[in-house]
Image (cartoon, helix red, strand yellow):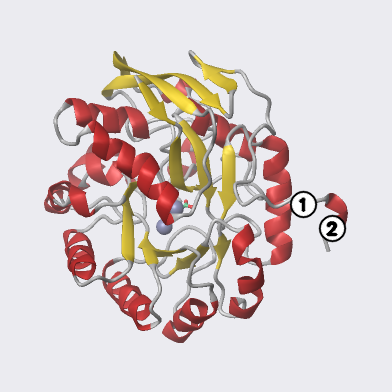
Amino acid sequence: MKLPGLIDIHVHMREPGAIHKEDWQSGTAAALSGGFTQVLAMPNTIPPVISKRSLSGTILIANGKAYCDFAQFIGATPGNALQLSPIAKQTAGLKLYLDQTYGPLRLDDMLVWMEQLKQWPKDWPVVAHAESRSMAAIILLAALFDRSIHIAHVSLREEIIIIKHAKERGLKVTCEVCPHHLFLSESDIPSLGEGCSEVRPHLAASTDQQAIWENIDVVDCIATDHAPHTLEEKECDNMPPGFPGLETALPLMLQAVHDGLLTMEQLIEKMYTNPKRIFRLPDQNDTWIDVDLNESWVVDPSIFYSRAGWSPFSGRQVKGRVRKVVLRGQQSFMNGQLLADPGFGRDLRNVTVHRSSLP
Ligand code: NCD
Ligand code: ZN
Ligand code: ZN
C-alpha cells in the first residue's frame, strides 16, 4: 500500500555531543527505514541548541549527513527569549522543557515561561515537555497570551482529559502521543528491567494507557520521541531516560490498525496530515512510502540503523513493513537498503548555512 512519507515531529539525533548514541546519519537512516521522510529534531544536544550559533552549527552538520528532510527545534533558556524571535523561522519551533528529563534545559520559573511565550512569534510552533500540573499551567499561560501550544508525549488520563476540555473550549492546544505510551505500561517494567523501562514521561498505569486509547480522537499526532541511549548506558546505575522508536513506530501503528484500534485514515492524519499542518511543513513533491501490510515480523534491533542497538519492543510480533521510500523523486530506501547518499536530506526551513557565516 502506498502512504505519504511520514513525519516524526519529535526525535533526538544526539549530534553534536553524543554520537555514540546516534548521529545525523544513523538517526535519519533509522527514520527513512521506518517510513519517515521528515523529522523534527529536539535541542537537548551537547551543547544544546539555544542560540543562532548553535542552531547554525547543528544545521550545518545535518545538511552534510541527513538521509531524510529535517528541521531543528531551538531550546528556551532563562535568558534567551529576546534573541530567539529573530531566528524563529529558521527553526522547527521553540521547545520548553518544564519538567525534569534528559539534558540541561529544564525551566523552573513560570515568569520565564511567560517571557518566552510572549516573545516567540505567534504563528510559529511552541512545544512543551510538560507533565501533569505543569501541562495544565502552560496551557493556561498559552491561552493568556492567545497563542497555540503543542504538548509533547501525553501519557496520563488527567492530561488527555484536560486537553479534551481545552479543545472543547476553543483553546489552541494540540498534542502528541508516543507509541511506547500506547503499547506499554507500568506492568511491562518487570520484564523490561529497570534501565530499559526508564523513560520520561514514565510508563504509566494501564488505566492511563486505556484512557489515551479511548480519547485517540483528541490525539493530534503520533510522535516517536526517538531518544536513543546505548544498552550499556541503560543498564548502568545512572540510567538515562529514553527509548529509541523510529524503526518500530509505523509497524506498531499498523498492527493497531490491523487489530481495529485505529483506522488507516486516523494513522495518516496523526503521522502526516496533522504534523504537517501544526508544524507548517512544506510539501514534499513526488514523495511516498510503500508498505507491505501483510508481512509479519519480529522486532529485532540488531538489524536497525539506530545506534541505540536495543528496543523496548524487542521480540514483539508486528504486522506491516516498509518496503520502499521515495523522497523527492529519489528511491531512497528499498528492502532494508539505503539507496540515497547522506546529505540528500534537506532543511525544511530552507536555511542556507555556509561555514564562513558562522560567527
Ligand atoms: C529524552 C532524551 O533522552 O533526550 N528522554 C526521554 O525519556 N523522553 C528527553 C525527553 O524527550 O524528555
Ligand atoms: Zn520530553
Ligand atoms: Zn524527547
Q: Is residue 171 visible?
A: yes
Residue depicted at 47% across the width and 63% down the height: 125
Q: How far apart are marks 1 and 2 (CA)?
A: 7 Å
Relative depth, front residue between 113 and 242: 113
Residue depicted at 45% across the width and 41% down the height: 7
x, y percent for residue 145: 40, 81
Q: Is residue 196 visible?
A: no
Label 1 beta carbon within 8 A of ligand 1: no
x, y percent for residue 112: 49, 82
Give the labeled residue for mark 2.
Answer: 357
Q: Residue 353 carries which label?
A: 1
Callout 1: SS: loop
Residue 42 drawn above or below residue 39: below
In which quadrant will I find the C terminus? bottom right
Q: Tag 2: residue type?
A: Ser
Residue farthest bottom in this picture: 111
Label 2 beta carbon within 8 A of ligand 1: no
Badges 1 and 2: C-beta atoms under 8 Å apart? yes
Residue farthest right in this picture: 356
User: Is 332 displayed left or right of 110 in the figure?
Assistant: right
x, y percent for residue 33: 49, 26
x, y percent for residue 244: 43, 39
User: Is 286 displayed left or right of 322 in the figure?
Assistant: right
Relative depth, front residue between 203 and 252: 252
Q: Tag 1: residue type?
A: Val
Callout 2: SS: helix
Residue 160 drawn above or below residue 110: above
Q: Counting other residues with Cα less than 10 Å from the Cα at mark 1, is it few (<14), some (14-19), or many (20 or more)?
A: some
